[in-house]
Image (cartoon, coloured by chain):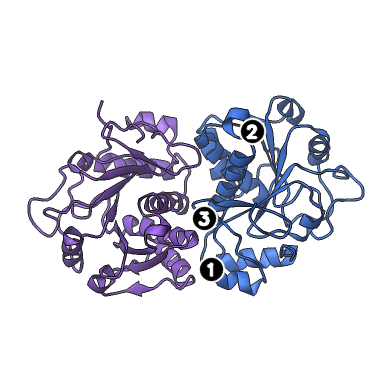
Chain colours: A blue, B purple
Amino acid sequence: MALRTISAKNAAALDKDLMSAGAFSIDQLMELAGLSVSQAVFKLQPLSKGKRILVACGPGNNGGDGLVAARHLWQYGYQPTMYYPKQSKNELYQRLTKQLKDLNIPFTEDFDAALKQTDHVVDAIFGFSFSGEVREPFPKVIEALRDTKIPVLAVDAPSSWNIEGGPPESGPGKGFQPSALISLTAPKPLVKWFKGRHFIGGRFLNTEMAEKYGLDLPPYEGLDQVVEVNVEGLKL
Amino acid sequence: MALRTISAKNAAALDKDLMSAGAFSIDQLMELAGLSVSQAVFKLQPLSKGKRILVACGPGNNGGDGLVAARHLWQYGYQPTMYYPKQSKNELYQRLTKQLKDLNIPFTEDFDAALKQTDHVVDAIFGFSFSGEVREPFPKVIEALRDTKIPVLAVDAPSSWNIEGGPPESGPGKGFQPSALISLTAPKPLVKWFKGRHFIGGRFLNTEMAEKYGLDLPPYEGLDQVVEVNVEGLKL
């Protein structure tokens, strides 16, 4: 039995459903998604193994999840650094950014320099709504993520990967294979090509929505907002 | 060294500060507060000791925390039942209520009957903004909580207690001493009269706000959104 996945189109429809019929606000969903991301980092990179986390955020919701994750990481005792070159004018992202600045979390514009001084990277650049071309300044960032030996946790998708088709055959993301992936709500079809450790997060799905979209309720345990799974979707 | 507390007036000012200068939304804060409450329940009442949780919600923010907590409890595998007799027309509370109804969580109007069929109670009736009189239909509910042998976790304050002065000298809450209390963000002065297990939750305070209001950053560990403390505020 393979892990059931959700297409990019259905992932967008599910988000919309959660916020209309489901009555969730984006603030709520992003808080829980970002919290999941922070918990995956905690499991991948215990504080004792290095506290410096570089969080690369894109301009959309994927970046927003990274902003929330960074705040929780600070609360756990990590030292996050933000790379957020295309800051949205969206009010929610501005507030999430302010929350980080109030914690004196540094924002850098020099990704390469920051990468040399970190223990772990969170790739929150592009998520399930990505398609097409990687725009500036991200091509070099994705090349650096592809080439680094530092562990990378990708949020929802390794940035630049095609959501349905997986790794690109050309461009900066060709050969990019991050060490870990956290799929929010449900894995996307690209997971078929992914070779690292795989987590599922976003513990807010209900039975009805899972059925509607043909998904499994992930095998979360205890208080965890995240669960590591194998290729069959079973808890590791 | 005694645990540092925050007055009702300052708790209201801190909430306001978090939502203005701090740029948090009420959705975010309530999600994290309710998540803390659910984690305290998990620590007090492991699933193996009984899954039925009766959540009594008042008309304001304290009730909202209860609504969020119930959703997370369902996700952990508990069977929450809601007693929420004075449902607010506030849009946020209506959405939080819808989220519970989508999980088929029952809402009851008969508190006494529900109390006979539960393993644990969450008292989310009144919080730090309570003062004065206990209005209908809550006097009988508080009497029932006072008299029951079932464990009760009070959110922020045992309902009907005076925030600064502690247990009331008359009325339904006279002699009400719940088995556990979760103080959100920081303990209120009433904690001095409280004799049960004490948790702190709401892991979103930053150093600056803590200093401004003369508070300690609670000694959270790992991923916990909640910490059990002794009378000195040290982790148990």
Q: What chain does mark 1 sit on?
A: A
Dot in front, 1 or 2: 2
Q: Residues within 10 Å of mark 2 (few under 14, many from 20)?
A: many
Q: What residue is at 17 percent from the left and 48 percent from the top? A: B162
Depicted A124 relative to depicted B105: above or below: above
A164 or A58: nearer the viewer = A164
Q: How many numbered badges does the structure rendering display?
A: 3
Give the mark nearest the N terminus, 1 or 3. Answer: 1
Depicted A40 relative to depicted A205: above or below: above
Q: Residues within 10 Å of mark 3 (few under 14, many from 20)?
A: many
Q: What chain does mark 3 sit on?
A: A
In 3D space, how far apart are the residues under numbered discs 1 and 3 (Cα atoms)? 12 Å
SS category of the residue bearing label 1: loop
Residue type of the residue flagged with mark 3 = Gln
| Labels 1 and 3 positioned on one and the same chain | yes
Q: What residue is at 26 percent from the left and 41 percent from the top? A: B188
- In the picture, the quarter occupied by the N terminus of chain A is bottom right
Q: Which residue is mark 1?
A: A22
Q: Which residue is mark 3?
A: A28
Q: Is residue A151 visible?
A: yes
Depicted B227 relative to depicted B107: above or below: above
* Outermost residue to the right: A170
Whether pointer 1 and pointer 3 mark residues with C-beta atoms closer than 8 Å, the reply is: no
Residue type of the residue flagged with mark 2 = Ile
Q: Is residue A89 visible?
A: no
